[in-house]
Amino acid sequence: MNPARLLLSTIAGVAAALIAFSVVSVRGDLGGVFHFLHERGVAKRLAAAGATPEQVTTAKARALAVAQSFADPALASRLIPLELLVGLLIAALVWWLFGQRVARAESGQERPDVQERMVMRFAHRHGGHFTLRDLMERSPLSSEQAREVTVRMVERGQLRREDEGYTLS
């Protein structure tokens, strides 16, 4: 089992569950959230400006009234199983996508354009000239993949064969 795959899937699932909880908690009313944040900011600015305690209390009460007009934590609590299911589905999707990517890379079925970009970057890092041996040793491409991609790139005119190496065209 790949620890990075497990960690990434877990983080994505927990994050999705928390986001689902938050969305349900405010009933999807993003405008209400921003209105509450504005009112809370007003209360904080009043307190910082030295307003009277009654003014600060009134501003805080107004912010609380705005929050209570759209927030429903009881609903969010009742729907925790649904929110956890959303998180589990997202975690499973990330697990599957990560596995597909790893399987393609390990089986050598990586998209040709990805391999060609790897070769182009490698060539640029080495001044536009490299040998097949350098490419096999210093890139993530296997020896077979390196040979295939260089042949394709020479056929299309992206690389030129010079002596024992290749040069960017």
Image: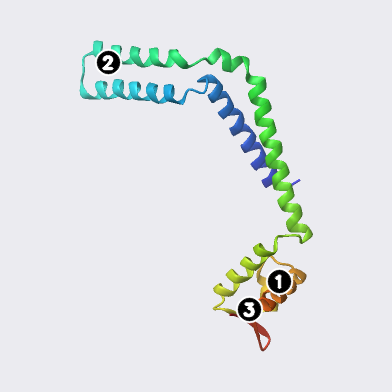
Give me the residue at 65% from left, 71% from top. Answer: 138
Q: Left or right: 108 with respect to 123? A: right
What's under tag 3, amino acid-wise? Leu
Q: Is residue 134 above or below residue 8?
A: below
Sequence-first tag of 2 and 1: 2
Q: Please tell me in which quadrant of the rendered image residue 136 appears.
A: bottom right
Distance (Cα) linking label 3 and label 2:
71 Å
Quarter of the rendering occupied by the C terminus? bottom right
What's under tag 2, amino acid-wise? Val
Q: Residues within 10 Å of mark 1 (few under 14, many from 20)?
A: some
Q: Residue furthest front?
A: 156
Tell which of 34 and 52 is nearer to you.
34
Q: Which residue is mark 3?
A: 159
For label 2, the SS is helix
Q: Are marks 3 and 2 in contact (CB under 8 Å)?
A: no
Distance (Cα) linking label 1 and label 3:
10 Å
Tell which of 152 and 79 is nearer to you.
152
Sequence-first tag of 3 and 2: 2
Give me the residue at 70% from left, 60% from top. Answer: 111
Give me the residue at 74% from left, 47% from top. Answer: 99
For label 1, the SS is helix
Q: Which residue is mark 1?
A: 149
Q: Are marks 2 and 1 in contact (CB under 8 Å)?
A: no
Quarter of the rendering occupied by the N terminus? top right
Q: Residue 120 at x, y = what percent?
A: 60, 71
Marker disc for residue 56: 2
Tell which of 30 and 122 is nearer to you.
30
For label 3, the SS is strand
Q: Residue 63 at x, y = what percent?
A: 36, 16
Q: Residue 121 at x, y = what percent?
A: 58, 69
Q: Is residue 64 above or below residue 14?
A: above
